Image (cartoon, grey):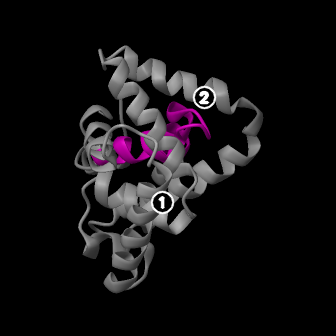
């Protein structure tokens, strides 16, 4: 039988589940297992739930997922290829075409080559669909700063994906639609 705290937490989490899972799937690629990341963040968030402000649960969880993915990625560098294959296999099981899988893999590899702040801004805006104002709140910075990170991140992605036959925007849209 769930406790009152568990019931309240699960109700609050239900509202942000899709966005949180999409974010975790993106930042975990090649660094850590998505399930491990989600479970670690969920446990940590539940333990600190009483201290999280009203309406701030998703922001808290995204910050925690970013920090945890960095930690898990450092600890598991030797498993990168296996983790990438797990992520791609999960997408294959959803019936995603081979062409789309190649696009998503190229996109994730390019995203992992961006500086951390640019990568996070691009993932939150382009793949998760957060507004610039929301991202500024999550990253504790100004909206102008987020716009600059997005601009630089997009420019660098275009440079990194010049060999790809598809436009990077189409790749971002593919990633956004198949991640859940």
Q: To which residue does mark 2 refer? A: 83
Under tag 1, what secondary structure? helix
Residues packed near mark 1 inside 10 Å, few (<14), some (14 to 19) or many (20 plus): many
**Residue 68 image offset from top left, x and y in percent:** 59, 51
In the foreground, 147 or 98? 98
**From the viewer's perspective, is residue 79 above or below residue 168?**
above
Examine the image and state in which quarter residue 51 appears: bottom left
Residue at the image position 51 percent from the left and 37 percent from the top:
39
Magenta stretch, residue numbers: 19-43
- Residue depth check, mark 1 versus mark 2: number of the one nearer the observer: 1
Earlier in the chain: of badge 1 and badge 2, it is 2
User: Which residue shows up at 39% across the image and 55% down it?
Assistant: 123
- Label 2 Cα crowd, 10 Å radius (few <14 / some 14-19 / many 20+): many
Q: Which residue is mark 1?
A: 119
Report if residue 52 lies within the magenta region.
Answer: no
Left or right of residue 143, residue 63 in this image:
right
What is the number of callouts on the image?
A: 2
């Amino acid at each position: 039988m769930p406790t009152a705290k568990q019931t309240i937490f699960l109700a609050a989490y239900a509202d942000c589940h899709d966005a949180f899972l999409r974010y975790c799937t993106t930042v975990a690629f090649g660094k850590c297992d998505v399930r491990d990341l989600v479970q670690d963040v969920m446990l940590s968030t539940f333990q600190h739930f009483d201290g999280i402000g009203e309406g701030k649960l998703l922001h808290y969880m995204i910050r925690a997922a970013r920090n945890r993915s960095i930690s898990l990625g450092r600890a598991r560098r030797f498993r990168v290829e296996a983790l990438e294959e797990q992520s791609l296999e999960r997408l294959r099981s959803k019936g995603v075409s081979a062409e789309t899988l190649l696009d998503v893999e190229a996109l994730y590899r390019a995203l992992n080559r961006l500086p951390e702040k640019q990568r996070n801004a691009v993932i939150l805006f382009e793949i998760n669909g957060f507004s610039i104002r929301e991202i500024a709140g999550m990253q504790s910075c100004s909206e102008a700063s987020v716009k600059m990170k997005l601009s630089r991140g997009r420019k660098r992605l275009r440079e990194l994906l010049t060999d790809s036959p598809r436009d990077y925007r189409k790749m971002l849209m593919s990633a956004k639609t198949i991640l859940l």
